[in-house]
Each structure stands twice: as C-alpha cells, then as structure tokens.
Amino acid sequence: MKKFILVFLAICVSAGAFAQSQTIRAFSHRGGRLERDENTAVAFQESWDAGYTGFETDIRMTKDGVLYLTHDHTLERTTNGTGVFEEKTAAEIDRLRTKKGNKIMSLEEFCKFLDGKENLYVEFEMKTAPKELYPQARLEDYVEKVYRAVKALDCKNAQFVFTSSDYRGLRYLQEHHPDAELLLIISKPLNDETIAIAKTVGIYTLGCRMEGTSRAMVEKAKKEGITVSLWPGLSVDDFMLGAYLGSDRMCTDVPLEVMKFMNEKCPWIKVVY
C-alpha cells in the first residue's frame, strides 16, 4: 500500500471523533470492473455474494430500442464485436460476447437480478453520449424506458438513483418524473464552480473527481445541502482518499479488496456496502 494509507490511518487514530462519526455508502462500480468482467451477470452476482448491496451500471439503447448494460458507445474494448453499439440491433448484441466470454447483460436481466432484494443502493447511469446518437426524441424514449424499468422493481428499503454527465436526460426526469432521485456527474473536482452548477440545475447530489477536491470544499458542499460522491475508485488508496475527503458515497472498481481492507484495517469507519 502507498504511504498515503499509513498517513491516513495515523490521522484517523489521532482524530477519533472524525473516524467514529463517518459513514460511507460504497458501491460496486460496474460490478467491480477491475476484479470481474464489467457490467456482466457474474460480476454483479459475485459482488452480491460477497456482501455488497450497492451497485452501479451503465445503460445504452440499441438501434431497435432495447436497453443493455455497457459503458462504451463502441464495442471493441469490452466485446468481440466492432462498430457503434447504438447502430446494432438487439439480435446482433445478443450474438456478441465480452472479451472474457460472457453475454452482454440487458437491463431487463439486471432488473431481474435486483428484483426482490432488500436494502439496495443502485446507480443507473444513463449513457447518452455522444449526443448525436441520442437526438431529443430518441433521448426521451430512452429515459422513459429506463425510468419505467427501474420503477417496476419491487425492492424493500431500496434507493435507486438516475445518474448522468449529460444533463438533458436528468432535465427530462426533473420535468416529467420529479420523484426520480438524480445525480449529476461532472468530470471536474468539487469546487465553487461545480457547487454553483448543482444549485443552478437543482440537482443536489454531485459525482465529482477526487483529484483537486479538498476536505474544505466537501464540507462547504455539505453545508449547501449537497450530497458528495467522489470518483474514480481504482484502488484501496482511492477509497481511503475519498474517506479522508469526507465523501458520502464512493464507487469502487475493486469492491472485494476494499471490503477486506476496511474490515481488517479501518473497522471504526462505518462502510455501508
């Protein structure tokens, strides 16, 4: 582990009040993309089996209007296919496999996995970039389908969050489904500018980059009524940095490693998995 972890542990031990009062909602980013085959059934199942109830996934829509879990708008990085995801039909996507041989999971299949489970926290990231792939009419159809699929879930004590870096979809939900919980992703640190953006658009949960974010700015955001989620979560070091900064929520690409480390080394920090 890096020197930062040792320094952080020393700070937490010497500042017991901070450590004892801190709670972080951890969630398995794409099912733990650095430990498992991202956004696949096996990834989510193994995170669940390890004790995670928090998940994040990415949703795209095929040419014929079917929703699948995939991050990129191109197929080459994660699958044995080529080309643009949105230009393929559902039948074409179903014939593809990930680089590790798994099926491309549909949103319907993911919802079946979630249905009936308790105490879930799930972020449904609406991937609608590049914007030319989702002109307004198609965007609205997409958002409605995602919203209806999520709202049909029967899960006790669940928190379902619609997230995006494309404000268009979030704005549509604000206007047509004000009950939807929203999170705005911004590829910048938490600072005065991003806090002002949150207040301007009326979305009081922000997903910002850790790099350039300070504890003082996290405290300021919280005083403004903003819930803070920080990323990336590539390592235990990242998770510890997020904890030090005071993040309310933290994604992690190494959920099993994070859980093991936090349980063994930082039991005084309450992490909700």
Image: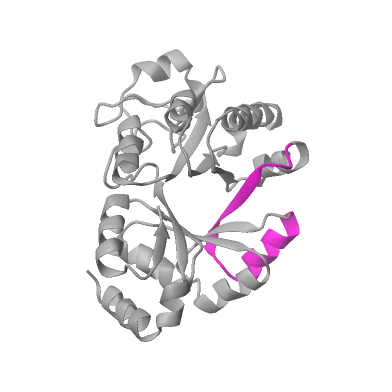
Q: Residue furthest top?
A: 91
Closer to the camera, 132 or 219? Answer: 219
The residue at 30%/63% (across/down) is 262
Residues in magenta, as a range: 177-201
Give the x, y percent position of residue 125.
53, 41
Number of labels in the image equals: 0
177 relative to 273, above or below: above
* Image coords of residue 91 (percent x, y): 43, 13
Q: Residue 19 location in percent, x, y?
A: 41, 75
Residue toward you, 121 or 177: 121
Q: Which residue lies furthest to the left in this view?
A: 1
Q: Which residue is drawn at 44% across and 29% down?
A: 110
* Residue 251 lies in quadrant: bottom left
The answer to whether residue 38 is visible is yes
**As displayed, is residue 39 above or below residue 85?**
below
Query: Looking at the image, which residue sits at the far right?
Result: 175
195 in the magenta segment: yes
Q: In which quarter of the image is residue 106?
A: top left
Kindly identify the residue that appears in the image at 31 percent across and 82 percent down.
10
Quadrant showing the N terminus: bottom left
Q: Is residue 108 left or right of residue 162?
A: left
Which residue in the rendered view is the most extreme toward the bottom?
14
For residue 224, side relative to residue 162 (left or right)? right
Q: Can residue 77 be seen in this view?
A: no
Foreground residue among 95 and 153: 153
Percent from the top left, x then y, of residue 121?
49, 46
Identify which residue is drawn at 24% across, 31% down. Answer: 100
